[in-house]
Image (cartoon, rainbow, N blue to C red):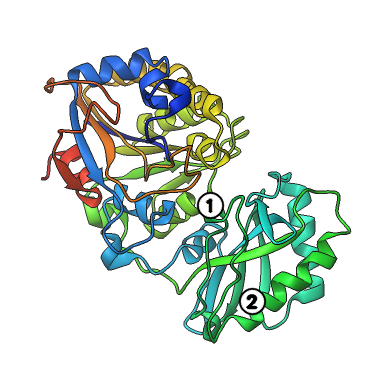
Amino acid sequence: MKYVVCIPDGCADEPLEELAGATPLQVANTPTLDRLASVGTLLRARVIPEGLPPGSDVGNMSILGYDPVLFHTGRAPIEAAALGLEVNGDSVAFRCNLVKVVDGVMIDFAGGHPDTDVAAKVIAALESALGGEASFHPGKQYRHILLAPSAWLHADCVPPHDLTGDKVVAPCGPAAAPLNALMEASSEIMADFDIDANQIWLWGQGHASEMPSFRDQHGLEAGMVSAVDLVRGLGCLTDMDVVDVDGATGWYDTNYEGKRDAALKGLSEGADLFVIHVEATDEAGHAGDVEAKIEALENWDRRILRDLVDALDEMGDWRMAILPDHATPLALRTHTSDPVPCLLVDSTRGGEGGAYTEVGVESAPIIDGHEIIKHLIGSD
């Protein structure tokens, strides 16, 4: 038996006036997904436990079968793991976004999605000018890491994607002063670069997270493909085979086919389970871009699921789970904690079937997100 977990990040949504009260999942042309849903089992997954922030760190940790209540220590240390950075007992990791703030308003939490190579030069300049007690480390596009003294942990920081179009709320509390100083000082350094971003934003801090391997947790050899360091970091922390794919960007233009083929290659070479993560639907939600979110869903269907299912059939028996790590409603442009649609498909037997939409699962049972893997592999 082979297992695949498909994560269209943030794909769940709410009814939209411009879609006549429908959601992107309802209007997108997704024939393969529709066919799978007609023979699968529909659930609602509570991927964000009560009391935890509705972020991709919490949601993806849940989907991989780790209870965030037990294992979550912060977002940034997970991303640091993907970069090979050690967050020891004397340090804390912060997510360091390159953002655009104008007249005190968060214009773009993603800083215009700068080229990764250009962004690395910006981070190097910040390290040269401002590094010392804390250090800057390059990631991809707008997503980077700051390692800082553990005393900085207890600052109250707001995720920049929660501030889009609003007045910024700078870190506050007794540990916030050095963070605010770095954020303010970054503007002058970044003015020398021809990019949209004009300062850094620090948030998502945490100490190192210790998680058992996926093998020990679930008894399976697993692989993963994602362009997002946060998701890749979860793979690194759990000893999954994290695969690099040329052209995987974490944006609308990501290499869908390359991710599909990486999963098939991994499964054919011995992996029992493979995770395919695509960020595009989440980015569209944050941008409030209805058409881009619909297109991303259709890309999932046409460029991943269609040929993925055919190839899995040739391998033998298989099971698949499809669910997002949280909802990212276009009208809100940020994450919510609502349970998300979840589809389980087994090639050897059918389920009750239905429609993989928010409406289609509104009467389906709710299960905790970290239990999804158990339902998928039959150990529930």
**Image position of 315 (left or right of 226):** left
> Hey, what amino acid is under mark 1?
Asp
Quadrant of image for the C terminus: top left
Which residue is identified by label 1?
229
Residue 314 placement: quadrant: top left
Q: Residue at x 53, y 47 (%)?
A: 228
Q: Position of residue 118 (x, y in %)?
A: 78, 49
Q: Which residue is mark 2?
A: 179
Q: Secondary structure at mark 2?
A: helix
Q: Earlier in the sequence, mark 2 or mark 1?
A: 2
Residue situated furthest right in the rendering: 192
Q: Quadrant of residue 277?
A: top left
Label 2, label 1: how many angstroms apart (C-alpha)?
Answer: 22 Å
Left or right: 222 with respect to 180?
Answer: left
Residue 271 in view: no
Which of the image's four quarters has the N terminus? top left
Q: In this view of the protein, can residue 105 be seen by the observer? A: yes
Mark 1 nearby-residue class (10 Å; few <14, some 14–19, many ≥20): many
Q: Position of residue 97 (x, y in %)?
A: 63, 58
* Closest to the observer, 241 or 178: 178
Q: Nearer the viewer, mark 2 or mark 1?
A: 2
Q: Residue at x 38, y 49 (%)?
A: 336
